[in-house]
Amino acid sequence: MNSEQSEEQDGRPVGRRVFLGTLGLGALGVVAAPTLQRGLEGFLGAVAGKDPTGLTGLLPNGGGFRYYSVAASVPRLKATDYHLKIGGLVDRPHTYTLADLRALPQTRLVKDVQCVTGWRVPGTPFEGVRLSHLLDAAGVRSTAKAIRFTCFDGTYSESLTLDQARRPDVLVALRMQDKDISHDHGGPVRLYVAPMYFYKSAKWLSGITVTDRVEPGYWENLGYDVDAWVGRSNGRTDEPTS
Ligand SMILES: Nc1nc2c(c(=O)[nH]1)N[C@H]1C(S)=C(S)[C@@H](COP(=O)(O)O)O[C@H]1N2
Ligand SMILES: [Mo]
């Protein structure tokens, strides 16, 4: 058993009942035994056939972080090839380069990171542009209610309500652990939603679309809570992170 598996045994199989209802018990019989140890994320990754071996792993020098990707492979972008598009229900759609984002006011936050499968990393610095700043610059229309986030892995997505997105502890992050965000951690740019479980912090962020309703993200379509407050969702009682 690797350390990921032993760790997951302490975690509760969050949202499993929801998930079982979705997929049906037939599929479960085939894969149940290993998955009880791997946790929901590993379980679902395996069922979806998305390279279960590449799904998670312990990052060397990751300082307690696990590496997650639901995509089998993710293109490595040179800094000069990166673009972040903001559009949808806005008056001024815009595409930012990495240099553009670096030139904007930066906010640094240091808080614990909590994954819904149980692991927690204390006091992790994230730094970047407040999402609220980009939304204000884009001119959010009065009919807008929510944000949809998309990723250049081609697969992952996330969502926030507009009120959640405007919180000062929600960043379009360029740095993590006081370094430029590495490819494995979702670089060059990932979302950082400090008060919510880490699945909200979409890696390899490429699109911010303002919408008129919340569209559940990747894991949320598979049973995780859309409102993912740490300690107040997913049936968990963790200490809040923000
Ligand atoms: N694009 C993308 N973002 C993602 C994920 C993913 O699979 N793909 N996994 C989420 C989950 S469940 C967690 S716990 C964190 C893991 O971040 P890390 O790999 O930097 O530790 O990323 C979140 N963002
Ligand atoms: Mo996670």
Image (tube, rainbow, N blue to C red):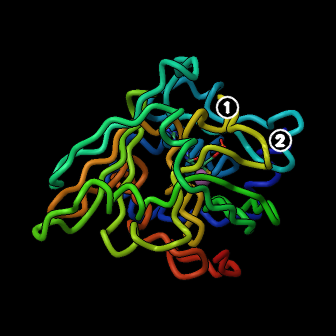
The quadrant in which the N terminus is found is top right
The residue carrying mark 2 is 62
**Residue 32 coordinates in the image, percent (x, y):** 56, 45
Residue 184 numbered tag: 1
Going 48% across and 37% down the picture, which residue do you hit?
Answer: 100
Q: Quadrant of ligand 1?
A: top right
Percent coordinates x, y for residue 43 in the rendering: 55, 43
Q: Are marks 1 and 2 in contact (CB under 8 Å)?
A: yes
In primary-sequence order, the first of circles 1 and 2 is 2
Ligand 1 contact, mark 2 (Cβ < 8 Å): yes
Relative side of 102 to 100, left or right: right
Q: In the image, 241: left or right of 85?
A: right
Q: In this view of the protein, can residue 148 be seen by the observer?
A: yes
Mark 2 lies on a secondary structure that is: loop
How far apart are the alpha carbons under marks 1 and 2?
10 Å
Residue type indicated by callout 1? Asp
Residue 95 lies, in percent from the top left, at 33, 35
Q: Residue at x 15, y 53 (%)?
A: 91
Count of picture labels: 2
Mark 1 residue's CB less than 8 Å from ligand 1: yes
**Nearer-the-camera pick, 58 or 184:** 184
Q: Nearer the viewer, residue 48 or 125?
A: 125
The residue shown at (39%, 51%) is 158
Above/below status of 200 relative to 175: below
Direction from residue 141 to residue 8 in the image, left or right: right
Query: Residue at the spot x=68%, y=78% of the render?
Result: 238
